[in-house]
Image (cartoon, rainbow, N blue to C red):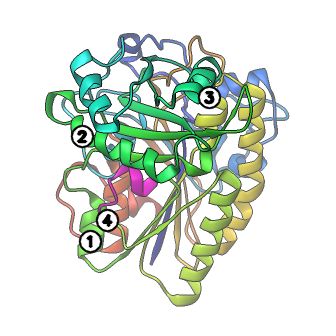
Amino acid sequence: MLVSVIVLDSVGVGELPDAAAFGDVGAHTLNHTLAAAPVALPNLSRLGLGHVPTVQTAPGTVQDVPAGGAYGRLREVSPGKDTSTGHWEFMGVQLEHAFQVFHDGFPARIMAAFDAATGRGHLCNRPYSGTDVIRDFGPEHLETGYPIVYTSGDSVFQIAAHEDVVPLETLYAWCQAARDLLQGPDAVARVIARPFRGEFPFERANEHRRDFSLIPPRTVLDALKESGCAVVGIGKIPDIYAHRGFTEEIHTDDNADGIAKTVARIAQAARDGTHGLIYTNLVDFDSKFGHRRDPQGYSACLARFDAALPDIVAALPSGGALLIISDHGNDPTWPGTDHTREYGLLLGSVSGRPAGVDLGERQSFADVGATAAEALGAAWAGPGESFWARIA
């Protein structure tokens, strides 16, 4: 048995009931993106995208056609709208308290300790757009060699450095030093290495990005691995869980690479009879287009995934399951540059099994992990209600 879970990072499907607490009333990543830059999504439509609550159908975009798969939406229980919160909840970790966010930059005591660890000073130390921060501080960084430290509306400590000034291994060592510092009451979800290159205004070297996450509590991934299942993390997935619970990790450079490697790994699993989970994150929606408020780029990214979807489905072995989900929103038409508090997308397909299954509004992202555990025969007594019987 094989289960493939693909996260369309930030492809939210409408405001959650508590969106007012996050300043996100009215956000809808999918609808607003397609309204601003219409593209056809025939393959996602055939799975059931047009039947997901609040998703608008329109000529040339989402089609109102019979659902060929299972469909619904996911309600996030944990307080937050960031990558770690959403992904941890997918695999059975419901947070009681949000991760620490430093809206005004990091306190002097933290930065003094970080400077001592690097042996240098630092630049910026405030919330900033990732592309703007290297444009505005990149020249000074080239002169001084000081790392550019910045944050956002998420629980992150980000370190940008030019690859010709700071070798990647040094940047990664600085990130690990920051990770060691940012624990307990100062803990942030992720420390992120953000290398850049080239001449002003510079270019982010996204393929060399690396996330240093907090270690999560026990997750469905641990239960799967302990039961003897293969657990394959593709893209930034292993980073998000601090590399816990995986039997194999596959790095990717961008969405196209992530899709190609997912298809290849599913096909290999089908040939080998692999029993387990292939878990992929496609981050370009979020990092390249959502944060940069680029609906045209976001729509084109959706269209590219839609075009690849038949190859993904065709690679599944008989009885294999595909779940397509999202971890939060990042409405590219919304003010600011931060994520938006939205429902997660849920589409499913099981090779050779019934279609047109309405999964409704799931009461937790954790239903995804519970479903994977039941499908693969792993014991999981934590949060989440499996919908495996509905689709299998």
Marks 3/4: CA–CA distance? 31 Å
Quick check: marks 3 and 4 in contact, CB under 8 Å? no
Circle 2 — which element? loop
Residue 240 highlighted magenta (yes or no): yes
Circle 3 — which element? helix
Residue type at the position of mark 1: Ala
The answer to whether residue 236 of the structure is visible from this angle is yes
Dot 3 or dot 4, earlier in sequence = 3
Quick check: marks 1 and 2 in contact, CB under 8 Å? no
Quick check: marks 1 and 3 in contact, CB under 8 Å? no
Residue 185 highlighted magenta (yes or no): no
Residue type at the position of mark 3: Gly
Which one is closest to the eye, mark 1 or mark 2? 2
Quarter the N terminus occupies: bottom left
Residue count near mark 4 (Cα–Cα under 10 Å), binned few <14, some 14–19, many ≥20: many
Circle 4 — which element? helix
The span shown in magenta is 237-245
Q: Which residue is mark 1?
A: 378
Q: Nearer the viewer, residue 95 or 379?
A: 95
Dot 1 or dot 2, earlier in sequence = 2
Dot 1 or dot 3, earlier in sequence = 3
Q: Which residue is mark 3?
A: 290
Picture disc at residue 373: 4
Quarter the C terminus occupies: bottom left
In this rendering, would 91 be left or right of 239? left
Dot 4 or dot 1, earlier in sequence = 4
